[in-house]
C-alpha cells in the first residue's frame, strides 16, 4: 500500500465526503463504495 502525502490524503478525503453527501440521498449502496475507497487511502 503506497503512502500518500498529506495533500493527497486531504483531497481524497474531501472528495469522498462530497461524493457521499451527494449520493447519500440517491442510493445507500454508495456507502459500500466509499468504504472501499477509504480503505484504498
Image: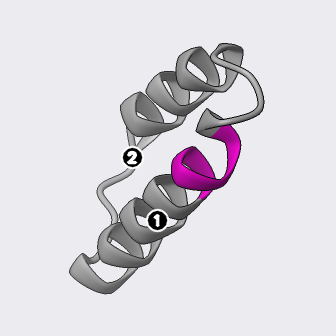
Please tell me whether mark 2 sits on a helix, a strand or a loop. loop
Q: Which numbered disc, 2 or 1, marks the residue closer to the eye?
A: 1
Q: Which mark is residue 12?
A: 1
Q: What segment is highlighted magenta in the picture?
A: 19-23
Q: Tell me where residue 1 appears, x and y as whole percent.
A: 38, 37
Q: Is residue 7 left or right of residue 22?
A: left
> Eyeballing the image, is 10 above or below 34?
below
**Residue position marked by numbered label 2 in the rendering:** 41
The quadrant holding residue 11 is bottom left
**Marks 2 and 1, the one that precedes in the sequence:** 1
Please tell me whether mark 1 sits on a helix, a strand or a loop. helix
Q: Are the residues tagged 2 and 1 within 8 Å (C-beta)?
A: yes
Q: Is residue 32 left or right of residue 29?
A: left
> Eyeballing the image, is 23 above or below 10?
above
Q: Is residue 32 part of the magenta span, yes or no? A: no
Q: Main secondary structure of the magenta part?
A: helix
Amino acid at each position: 500500500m503506497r503512502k500518500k502525502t498529506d495533500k493527497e490524503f486531504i483531497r481524497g478525503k474531501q472528495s469522498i465526503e462530497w461524493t457521499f453527501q451527494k449520493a447519500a440521498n440517491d442510493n445507500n449502496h454508495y456507502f459500500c463504495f466509499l468504504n472501499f475507497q477509504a480503505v484504498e487511502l
